[in-house]
Image (tube, rainbow, N blue to C red):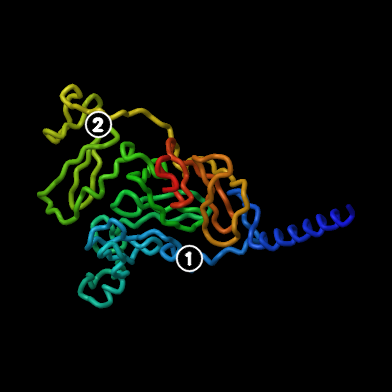
Amino acid sequence: MKWLLNGLLLLFIILMVHRNRADEDLVVAPGPDDDGEGLNVQDKDIYDMYENTQINVCGNVADGVYLPYVGNCSKYIECENNTIKEVGSCLDLAKDNPDICDPNKSCELGYDPVLQVCTYMEEVQCLPTCESFRLSSFCYDNTCTKYVLCYYGKPVLRQCHDGLQYNNATDRCDFPEYVDCVANDCSATFQPEDIIYLGSKASCSKYYVCSNGHPWEQQCAPGLAYNPSCKCCDFAKNVNCTIDAVARNILPYSRTPLRRADIKCPLMGTHFFPHKSRRDAYYYCVEGRGVTLDCTPGLYYDPKVEDCRRPEFVGV
């Protein structure tokens, strides 16, 4: 009996030593308000979103389309055959072509992803930047599926699956019937006279006018609805609109209190983990700091793609 107890004690000691070694690079995830003092955090200046993703940046992007470069408003990405052909810079373009700028103005150029041109920085519609200590997201390209998730100043490229689309009103992937993503239906190649009218997918009283590759949102007066036949606002009785405008009251991450992740987060890098007890939630860790995120109602988290999906596709 004594040898059995000694054997169990030795096994317990071995397991504890192994566990301590395995946890050397882990910390208890601090709350979002903690200052993170003592954490071994990567230098923000060397972090590159494009080197920290398995997502194909140019996937489903038409040839000849230029994407903005997250973190640098003067750079752009040229896509060809669903791959990155070149990463260019408007500043380099100005150096190689000195006549491109007005000699009476400072030649500081940036890339405008809406107009797909290099222009003066003060006129550029740059992508948002990731703010320190704040959780937020923003749309990345015209495919309606890619978006950037921000936490503690680190941008992470994300992608919706199974026909889901990024909803900037909720900061997450959503069913397409609740998302007004029409950017991909507008083309910068159209001439000004080729104006396109697009009805909203989420509201009977809203529509979009596409001009110069950008969708401009329009709202009909109260009591009226958009009629695609006349491309105008009309009496609701004359419009066959079946959109269910039920309010789901899903607040975006940026407007809700952050919830601490009840797991140990790796001290370095960005990571996504399944929730311990909920299929419709997951954990997001950034260099030791962890938060709990919810899926859109009706979706489940899939560790295979590290995002929320329709239940029938989880694990496929």
Tell me if residue 80 comes above or below residue 279 in the rendering: below
Q: At label 1, which amino acid type do we have?
A: Tyr
Q: Position of residue 225 (x, y in %)?
A: 21, 29
Label 2 Cα crowd, 10 Å radius (few <14 / some 14-19 / many 20+):
many
Q: Which quadrant holds residue 3?
A: bottom right
Q: Which mark is residue 205?
A: 2
Residue matched to label 1: 47
In depth, the one of 19 and 179 nearer the eye is 19
Q: Residue at x 85, y 57 (%)?
A: 6
Question: On the picture, is 174 further left or further right than 198?
Answer: right
Q: Position of residue 264 (x, y in %)?
A: 63, 52
Query: Which comes sooner in the sequence, label 1 or label 2?
Result: 1
Q: Residue at x 23, y 70 (%)?
A: 101
Q: Position of residue 56 (x, y in %)?
A: 36, 60
Q: Residue furthest top?
A: 237
Question: On the picture, is 14 further left or further right than 308?
Answer: right
SS at mark 1 in the image: loop
Q: Position of residue 131 (x, y in %)?
A: 48, 54
Q: At label 2, which amino acid type do we have?
A: Ser
In depth, the one of 154 and 28 nearer the eye is 28
Q: Is residue 180 visible?
A: yes
In depth, the one of 166 and 101 nearer the eye is 166
Q: Residue at x 50, y 53 (%)?
A: 151
Q: Residue at x 57, y 59 (%)?
A: 287
Q: Residue furthest left?
A: 193
SS at mark 2 in the image: loop
Label 1 Cα crowd, 10 Å radius (few <14 / some 14-19 / many 20+):
some
